[in-house]
Amino acid sequence: MSDQYCYPGSHVLVNLYGYADPELWKAAERRVVQAHLIDLIEHPITGDFDLPHLQAIHTALVEGFYSWGGQLRTTDTGPGGTGIAHCRPEFIRAEADRVFATLAASDHLRGRDRDAFSRALAWTWGELTVIHPFRDVNTRTQFTFFNQLALHAGWLIDWTTIDPYLFGYARTVAIVSDERGIDALLYPALEPLAPSSAEPVQALRRGADRFVAGGQAWTRQDLDRALVAAIERRDA
């Protein structure tokens, strides 16, 4: 199936640098987006934690590399190699409005204890993973958005305790099942912020480096076992 976002006959996304070689394209994209991600940690985009806020973050992350920053995708997508589908393009806006309305109704998760915050954050993250609003760079956009949301609600996510590959798998599972895996990984990584605490920029920078690096790929069997074990620990 053709994809208007890609060069003809290629899976390489059309980019402003003109990279057509898959390895050069992906390496350049990582450098550009990671630099913008760190800048957003140090200088967050203010917003109402809604779809326009998410779009503004995406726009900033892909600035100078893709021309479609912040634009809702118009083609079907799914996690590569899984056969799983994300939300159809025509339903993206309505589904996003539903999720962000729920988030707003919960006062953006402020005033919740660790258990309640983790469960609500996991549900929201899982739903946004299903929606997958943009053609690419959704994961890094959500990472930026949800870390900012957590700080706003008085929590810091310690990403040094979460394997990024396993977390990505938990998000994929949430598309077809539920968000319990996301919750199980987030819950032990949450640290409360004192009201007087300055924004923990250094901790988030370290977390961003680990999250984007991805780590060692796991086998499907190991992923399943690790996620089940995490859920069992959470339930206990």
Image: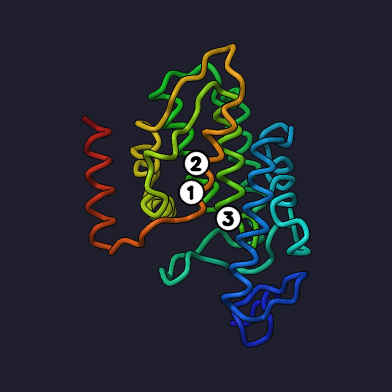
Marker disc for residue 211: 1
Report whether 30 appears left or right of 191: right
Q: CA gap, disc 1 to disc 3?
A: 18 Å
Q: Secondary structure at mark 2?
A: helix
Q: CA gap, disc 3 to disc 2?
A: 22 Å
Find out whether the residues at labels 3 and 2 contact each other: C-beta distance under 8 Å.
no
Q: Residues within 10 Å of mark 3 (few under 14, many from 20)?
A: many
Residue found 47% across the figure and 31% down from its top: 120
Q: Secondary structure at mark 3?
A: loop
Q: Residues within 10 Å of mark 2 (few under 14, many from 20)?
A: many
Query: Where 41 falls versus 212 (above or below)?
Result: above
Residue 129, position as x, y percentages in the image? 52, 51
The residue carrying mark 3 is 132
Report whether 13 appears left or right of 16: left
| Rendering quarter of residue 19 | bottom right
Chain-order first, disc 3 or disc 2: 3
Residue 186, position as x, y percentages in the image? 40, 36
Q: Amino acid at mark 1?
A: Phe
Query: Where 203 falls versus 125 (above or below)?
Result: above
Q: Amino acid at mark 3?
A: His
Q: CA gap, disc 2 to disc 1?
A: 6 Å
The residue carrying mark 2 is 207
Residue 21, position as x, y percentages in the image? 62, 81
Q: Quadrant of the N terminus?
A: bottom right
Chain-order first, disc 1 or disc 3: 3
Query: Which one is in front, 70 or 193?
Result: 193
Residue at far bottom of view: 9
